[in-house]
Amino acid sequence: MAKQRQRLTDRKSKVTVSDVARMAEVSDSTVSRIMRGQDLVAEATRERVMATVRALGYVPNRIAGSLASLDSRLVGVVIPSLSNIVFPEILQGINAGLEGTHRQSVISVTDYDLDKEEVVVRNLLAWQPAAVLIAGSMHTEATQRMLENSGVRVVEFMEIDHKPIDAAVGFSHLSAGVAAARHLLQRGYRRFGYVGYGGEKDRRALMRYKGMRACLAEAGLAFEAESVSDGQTTVAKGRAQTADICARAPDLDVLTFSNDDMAVGGLFHCMSAGISVPNDLALFGFNGLDIGRALPQPLSTIRANRFEIGKRAVEVVLAGETRPEQSVIVDTGFEIFEGATA
Amino acid sequence: MAKQRQRLTDRKSKVTVSDVARMAEVSDSTVSRIMRGQDLVAEATRERVMATVRALGYVPNRIAGSLASLDSRLVGVVIPSLSNIVFPEILQGINAGLEGTHRQSVISVTDYDLDKEEVVVRNLLAWQPAAVLIAGSMHTEATQRMLENSGVRVVEFMEIDHKPIDAAVGFSHLSAGVAAARHLLQRGYRRFGYVGYGGEKDRRALMRYKGMRACLAEAGLAFEAESVSDGQTTVAKGRAQTADICARAPDLDVLTFSNDDMAVGGLFHCMSAGISVPNDLALFGFNGLDIGRALPQPLSTIRANRFEIGKRAVEVVLAGETRPEQSVIVDTGFEIFEGATA
DNA sequence: CTGTTAGCGCATTCAT
DNA sequence: ATGAATGCGCTAACAG
């Protein structure tokens, strides 16, 4: 009785199915059916029920619903960073893929820290997600085990240079590095410098670097100077590191960057310092960001499609609830964009 | 019996508190207490239980936990876009503010569509979040009502030019527009052009525009040419629209942009077209993005602190579970960055 | 087409 | 310091 009264006055007290059912003079199940859009209900009752739903401002409790149906409709997403523009782009692809399904993404960020990733994955699995989309292939043993044993679909995205837990969507960063170096060698460059960020933390940037180095080695060459910084990737760092490497190694003929942000900064340094690009010094990025194409000289780079990686990753998990016998690998590829800086 | 056996073989079947309790020979409540870090348990039992937790790979089900405790520990976040870099930056601030608490953010994107926002908010509230952080102050009537009646803390972030439902964190975009125009007038500019995106959809860009226009009007001036595009904000669009407006109105002396992305594109056009900045044409942006400062000529702009907006928004909801009598307004401010382009 | 009956997995009294 | 009982709000058989 007291509780009853409270229900009517306390704005925060939740309206439940039973409240709606009682007022509409039907059973709970009927309300539940209607709310879930099942079509085996009489049009008349549906309308009556919907009217009281609106009158009471009833919002179904998905927590209770998920518990009862053992389906949370959640898709866990684990990314290393939000400050590197490529990850928001992947999130856009994921959202696009999820659009129209009844699934919701829950995003967690690891800051490129594998221990943090472990915590984040544990917390995510606690929500009983229908699937987990996780950036990268390198995890702690515990993370690996949790993901394997969870039984849910797991897509490791960004890279495909490994045997996935369940599925992988992305491209080979090693091959991308090789392709970049080969392209630049073909164009006649011989004296290479490297400007990057993240060091050991961004394994994928490292793989591209290794790919380039291996390709150069085959040609009897090596990077003559390198500049690698910590933390996040920024245009400002690219500019500063380029200034630094130009001072230390003035005779390079091409600078390869871990990514476009850094390369754009490199170009800005050259503009300011009066270095003619690509005649005095050529620049080559990685990612194919929008900004690179809008520069006074379009940036030479390797394009990869982040949006598509996100979208395809979702498609893989939507394709089936259970893991396939054979792990799935989707190669979204990459392509050289010639541009005007190399 | 059959179910029992399934539990042991089927990797997907979940381990529950009861499984752990039975194996560790304690009651469910004891396991529950331990998992929640309550300290009124004997060290010996705790260790025994934790050992079986690890052995079974038990992960507590937060859905069940939330239902039982009526606390989801979720914070709903509603943003219009992921492609505009300012929103990922705000998300970083939100994550930073949430770090260490036991709260998790759940992000939804509206694409600047108020009807979509309504759907998204309804879906979010279904998860019984402890709070909702939502960009902007303009909502449909239904959205407004849902948020009001939800009883949870609601922070509208980005703008503070309105009476909030509960709290607002951000700054006055109108004032920012006025400040920009006043600054440029003081520096002697008289013939203004405007380059923007989003049209009616990005209300905040519109507010800044209106602020500028009002300030110009006071000085007996007006924008002599304008170029506004649809869709998302990109450097490429800024460049194209600047080219367009320069062709149509060659005698302007300053171009104001809806934001830095567009302004950077504008600068790129000028570089390519041999227009001397700021002598032939001055450029003024908005946001204070990293890239603007790394340009050969630092971009003149208004800086606003997105990270802080996210962080402060979280602080407001962490400050208390119930809405204060008086709605809270946090002004994170903005500042003119002189730069070298105006 | 609609109602009844049982849980989903856990947190929370209240005992002991 | 630990256990037993109750219910969070909803969905899923199963009846009718």
Image (cartoon, coloured by chain):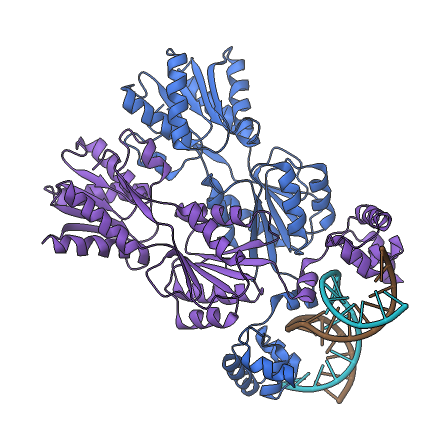
Chain colours: A blue, B purple, C cyan, D brown
Q: Position of residue B208 (x, y in %)?
A: 26, 53
The structure residue drawn at horizontal position 59% and vertical position 38%, both measured from the top left corner, is A136
- In front: A290, or B319? B319
**In the rendered image, is residue A187 in sight?**
no
Q: Quadrant of the C terminus of chain A?
A: top left
For the image shown, how many numbered marks are present on the structure?
Answer: 0
Q: Position of residue B236 (x, y in %)?
A: 30, 41
- In front: A70, or A14? A14
**B208 relative position to A53: left or right:** left
Rendered view: B211 above or below A41? above
**A202 relative position to B228: left or right:** right
Rendered view: A241 above or below A248? below
The structure residue drawn at horizontal position 50% and vertical position 53%, both measured from the top left corner, is B315
**A300 relative position to B227: left or right:** right
Q: Quadrant of the N terminus of chain A?
A: bottom right
**In the rendered image, is residue B152 in sight?**
yes
Q: Position of residue B309 (x, y in %)?
A: 42, 50
- In front: A78, or A148? A78
Q: Position of residue B111 (x, y in %)?
A: 41, 57
